[in-house]
Amino acid sequence: MTGALYIHIPFCRRRCGYCDFYSTVCADESIQSATVERIIQQAELIAERFSPTLSSVYIGGGTPSALPLPILERLFDALGRLFTLSAECEVTVEANPETSGEAFLRFLKTTPVNRLSLGIQSFDDRVLQLLGRDSSRRTALKAVERAAANGPARLNFDFIGEIPGVPASLTACDIRTAASFRPSHISVYALSVPEGSALEKRLAGREISSCVEEAFNEAAAFGYERYEISNCALPGGESRHNLAYWRMEPFWGCGPSASGTFPNETGRVCRREGVSPLEAFLSAEPEKSWTEEILTPRDLLFETVMMGCRLKEGIALDDFYHKTGRVLRDAAPKTVARALKAGLFREENGRFLPTAEGWRWLNRFLVDFLSELDSTL
Ligand code: SF4
């Protein structure tokens, strides 16, 4: 079986105010090392059971670049021993500006990593402070300069948009700066603020005056195509790993909270999630360090719609039928007909495709789709 592998490194130097990924602040090397050993044991179980050929590997988190290099080296050695990588395998590692120095970039050259994803978020000091980031404009610019000069050929820079009180012109300026380094890929995610968080209090009373669409329009002037609701790329620079998620291709996850979705031996689609928090992950037997469930037909169908509608390429209708056993239009006929009539989607060459307007109203469409789907079950 061919598929994608995600490795979750659950350590950060500090927690950012908006982040909902699982990670913990821990600089204890014995705990970091034990965690990577447990991740390797999970990878061994995946290799034994599925013998997959990997089309992509993504080492994210958390902050993989915050790990000591010998611990990262141990991880790469194990992955090389356990898995066959396809000829075109995309191997991404995430890093933050303050932990992606020359030594880290030199180390990457000794590994199969061919893509680096830098969490920039903004080049503006006030915004970085507001978000609770460790970096500054100076460290962020240094990091992109270093990565462009000495990093892997394929780069992604991550940004956050739709921050209350931050004008669209500032995000656009960030995108122009990023594009001048010609990364193959730029992500702009709309800020989501955890309820009851300190960040929510800091942002109280500020209005959202920008939208990510404006940032993507800016990137388009530099040749970047918005191929997913939150991502754009130069031609050929799309994230193959993330495409595997959005297309609901098989993927496996290792690490606390890392999820995977793949067909089991009987062809049913399984969802697996690494147990968290870290203490529970480390104390569980490797075989019990995931929770596993079979996706219900309803959940599989809805997830396939939810993920596929994020993509500009939309959903291939015959593939949808093959995966879910249902015709997309029949699953929620009124919602689909309404969305087509309103120009939120169009059907073309056997695909169900979102329009720019469809992306703007995607959440509303998905709520209606699910509600109609549930009413017919
Ligand atoms: S560094 Fe990244 S993973 Fe860690 S808390 Fe901040 S946003 Fe989340």
Image (cartoon, rainbow, N blue to C red):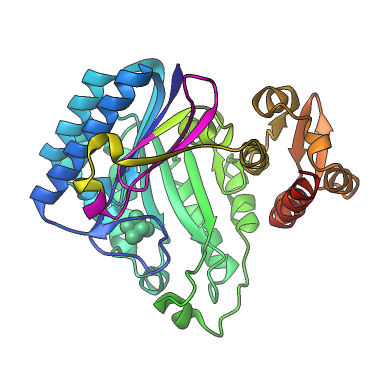
Q: Quadrant of ligand 1?
A: bottom left
Q: Is 60 in front, or is 100? A: 60
**Residue under the point 52% across and 64% down:** 192
Q: Nearer the viewer, residue 172 or 305?
A: 305
* Residue lying at 17% horizontally and 37% vertically, measured from the top left: 37
What x and y, as percent, mark residue 284? Answer: 23, 44
Residue range in magenta is 253-280
The C terminus sits in image quarter:
top right
**As displayed, is residue 1 above or below residue 20?**
above
* Above or below: residue 91 compared with residue 219: above
Residue 68 seen in render: no
Q: Is residue 26 left or right of residue 168?
A: left
Residue at figure coordinates x 79%, y 50% from the top left: 375
Residue 76 position in % (x across, y down): 21, 29
Q: Is residue 366 magenta?
A: no
Nearest the eye: 234 or 11 = 11
In the displayed structure, would residue 222 be above or below residue 207?
above
Whether residue 258 is visible, yes or no, is yes
